[in-house]
Image (spheres, helix red, strand yellow):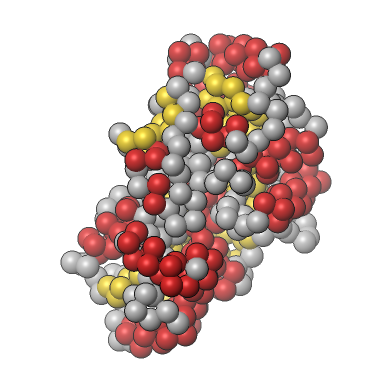
Amino acid sequence: MPLLLGCIADDFTGATDLANTLVRGGMTAVQIIGVPDGPLPEADAVIIALKTRTAPVGDAVAQSLAACDALVAAGAKQVFWKYCSTFDSTDAGNIGPVGDALLKRLGSGFAVACPAFPTNGRTIYLGHLFVGGALLNESGMENHPLTPMTDANLVRVLSRQASGGVGLVPFGVVEQGVGAIRREMTRLVDAGRRWAIVDAVTDAHLMAIGEAVAPHALVTGGSGVAMGLPENFRRAGLLPPRADADALPPMRGFAAVVAGSCSRATLGQIGLARDHAPVLELDALATPDAAALVAQALGWVDGKLAADRPVVIAASATPEKVAALQAKLGREAAGALVEDAVAAIAEGLVARGVGRLVVAGGETSGAVVQRLGVTSLRIGPEIDPGVPWTYANPTGLHLALKSGNFGARDFFLKAFSHG
């Protein structure tokens, strides 16, 4: 099975989100944890999941280039650089610097940037990113503890990060379809632009954009713009029909949720779960010690694990508590405390027989899969838009890695009705 699409993601939940999109398009997909040091597994698409969203710029660029080299060496016909649909990136990086480095490595002079994901309420209109009906900087993302987003104009945001100039393919052009999009991209290249933010309000827009970028060496954005890529390979006669791209081994074991995300969506999911399942909410501000939090959680869970409903252990907090913890410990130390505690709790749950585990939060998911020794994930059926079940090698564990902002309010409950 030749590798068609090689993908690089800046966090682990974003990688599964992208893989889920490709599987729904009929591609088999495997997610690799970290830069591989050996042959890649056979799949139509391989997604290398990095933990670079908030890493120092130099580290993010170096890891992304190493991932790109591995994918190109394996024969990838196109490279996709995946970042969050809320464009999580400070003015110092990392989306622009990584994108510039990938363009240079692939010998390409132009790429699109389109984080739109209308199914989850992320739309771009006249270059401005909306989350639901709110501008990005009024959506709660302005309070993100690591990448606060205070400007909804993505042309401005990317211009402060990337080199070569940033243009816009506006709504009126996208509405006209593939030919118009390609003509506008050519005009931007002729005007000296290296990047184009592309408006998208509907899935039909994303499909048209996906077709328009078929000849591009590099495509960048959220998982939504990848919707149109499988059909490009199918039209080229490279992708055969597949009815079982999301098949996974049977699920077994107890069910659990661990959460480190502080997003509004995750806080709402925890709130609903309280009425239906055992829920423990850890307070890292009151107990700023990872070992103590782990002991508290694993002591609490004894006797509560079950196969027919999950236990939920959350180190999530309101923006006010997050700010207080950061003021007490420092931003990096506060984040590391929560990630380390939740990862160790997940390890303890698996040791107690949990075979189905939902992890909420991108940084948290990265810490958990690394702690569990997961090297790759086979992508399975979708639970909610952007969040599939996966089968983790070599552990045999079923994992759902949920971006903090994703999932319906009942996600923690309905996840375990799948499979």
249 left or right of 77 in image: left
Using the image as rendered, state which of residue 201 and residue 19 is in the foreground: 201
Using residue 89 as the reference point, say whether residue 123 is left or right of it: left
214 lies above or below 118:
above
Please tell me which residue is depicted at 32% across the width and 53% down the height of the picture: 264
Q: Which quadrant holds residue 402?
A: bottom left
> In the displayed structure, would residue 355 be above or below residue 16?
below
Position of the N terminus by quadrant = top right
Query: In the image, what residue occupies the spot 47% across and 31% down?
Result: 153
Residue 372 position, x and y percent, is 56, 73
Q: Residue placed at 65% from the left, 35% from the top?
A: 162
Note whether 301 is above or below 415 in the view shown.
below
Q: Residue furthest left?
A: 275
Residue 98 in the figure: left or right of residue 415: right
Quarter of the picture containing the C terminus is bottom left
Residue 99, position in %: x, y? Answer: 67, 39
Q: Position of residue 165 (x, y in %)?
A: 66, 26
323 vs 335, left or right, is left
Specify whether residue 332 is in view: yes
- Residue, far front: 327
Percent across and percent down for residue 370 are 59, 69
Residue at (57, 43) in percent of width and height: 91
Q: Which one is nearer the viewer's eye here, 172 or 15?
A: 172
Can I make out residue 383 in this image?
A: no
Q: How many marks?
A: 0
* Front-lying residue, 211 or 166: 166
